[in-house]
Image (cartoon, rainbow, N blue to C red):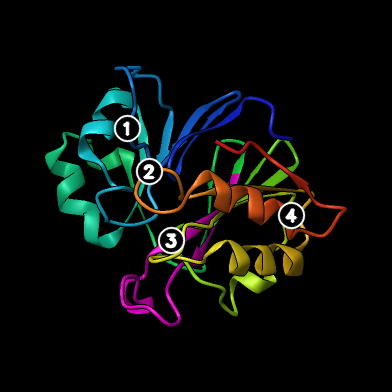
Amino acid sequence: MIENVEVLCHSSIKFSKEEIIYFDPFKIKENYKDANIIFITHSHYDHFSEEDINKVRNDNTLIFITNDLYEKTLDLGFKKENIIIVEPNKEYKIENIEIKTIPAYNINKKFHSKQNNWVGYIIKIDSITYYIAGDTDITEENKKVKCDVAFVPIGGTYTMNFKEASDLINIIKPKIAVPIHYGSIVGSKQDAIEFTKLLNKEIETGVVL
């Protein structure tokens, strides 16, 4: 289920399947220019990195963004027809990829307000459902997520810490859980190790950076 799926850095994820898909590209090493689709969860610099978007995009790349990023995305040179503005709790479809958005926000912190309408994504590809949580705490919405593979932030400070992230995973019970949002700005590899220790035994863990 996570073959051809990489956590590149922080919250940056690459799917190399029938389509090349990036989520929140960040600290990309080379000018790959290979993205068919880019998904952006919100406008913070470590998720909407103009430099890194330019390293993976090409003239035909589709980009999913939140409403507050529309002008910046136009300024990057994206064609209007290649920009999809998303809102929480909506459904979209691109070819054989089914997409749902879910609110991503803080409960007890000020960094990610629910009123910003920032998102996580639930993506169904080849009958496998992936949840990319975005920067979020445990919420009433994400406790209801159904997925096969979940990518959840564990770094604390701005998002859930590893204990909170493990609690969420044990509630939603994916087959595989992958920790993200650590090792670059906040959080450590030890946080990822502790996260895996707290998961129910039937839940597999993905790559620890």
Give the distance between the C-alpha atoms of the residues marked 3 and 2, in whole angstroms: 15 Å
Which residue lies under the disc numbered 3?
A: 135
Give the distance between the C-alpha atoms of the residues marked 3 and 4, in whole angstroms: 22 Å
Q: Quadrant of residue 57?
A: top left
Which circle's residue, 4 or 2, is located before the other in the chain?
A: 2
**Residue 205 left/right relative to 179:** right
Q: Residue at x 69, y 27 (%)?
A: 3
Q: Within 10 Å of the Cα at label 3, are there few (<14), some (14-19), or many (20+) other Cα atoms?
A: many
Q: Residue at x 34, y 76 (%)?
A: 113
Name which residue type carries label 4: Lys
Looking at the image, is mark 4 or mark 1 nearer the viewer? Answer: 4
Up-down relation of residue 105 to residue 61 (above or below):
below
**Residue 197 left/right relative to 54:** right
The quarter of the rendered structure image containing the C terminus is top right
The quarter of the rendered structure image containing the N terminus is top right
Which residue lies under the disc numbered 2?
A: 184
Name which residue type carries label 2: Ser
The reply to whether the C-beta atoms of the residues labelled 1 and 2 are less than 8 Å apart is yes
Looking at the image, is mark 3 or mark 2 nearer the viewer? Answer: 2
Specify whether residue 94 is painted magenta. no
Which circle's residue, 1 or 3, is located before the other in the chain?
A: 1
Magenta part of the protein: which range?
98-121
Specify whether residue 107 is painted magenta. yes
